[in-house]
Amino acid sequence: MSSNKYKKGFKKAYQQLTLAQETEAREKLWAALGITTRVSFNNYLNGKIEPKASQAEAIEKVFSEYGITNIWEECEEKE
């Protein structure tokens, strides 16, 4: 059984940001993902779009700037 740690997005980490950090972090995440719309951001945030490996690495880097290391909501697969 394979596990996909990106399947449910990075909402878990995003909720750990303070309100003061949220705007700046969101701008960095948009740049890291190469997106320009809230719809696209929400799709990545909630795991509707799976990030490429380079995007996942960039997302992890953004959150590490805020001391957040527990980023991905893992999907539990049924057997």
Image (cartoon, grey):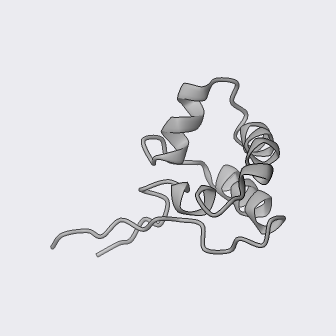
Residue 77 higher or lower than 10, as above or below: below
Q: Horizontally, is 12 left or right of 34 in the view?
A: left
Residue in the picture at 49% in, 59% down: 6
Q: Horizontally, is 33 left or right of 74 in the view?
A: right
> Would you identify the image quadrant in which residue 62 lies?
bottom right
Residue 27, given in percent of the width and then of the height, sits at 79, 38
Q: Residue furthest top?
A: 37
> Would you identify the image quadrant in which residue 71 lies?
bottom right
Residue 58 higher or lower than 76, as above or below: above
Q: Nearer the viewer, residue 4 or 75?
A: 75
Residue 54, given in percent of the width and then of the height, sits at 70, 53
Residue 37 higher or lower than 75, as above or below: above
Q: Nearer the viewer, residue 7 or 1?
A: 7
Q: Quadrant of the C terminus?
A: bottom left
Residue 61, given in percent of the width and then of the height, sits at 78, 62
Residue in the picture at 84% in, 65% down: 65
Residue in the picture at 35% in, 65% down: 75
Residue 20, given in percent of the width and then of the height, sits at 79, 51
Q: Horizontally, is 79 left or right of 8 in the view?
A: left
Q: Quadrant of the N terminus?
A: bottom left
Q: Residue furthest front?
A: 19
**Total numbered circles:** 0
Q: Nearer the viewer, residue 11 or 32?
A: 11
Residue in the picture at 59% in, 35% down: 41
Q: Nearer the viewer, residue 28 or 34?
A: 28
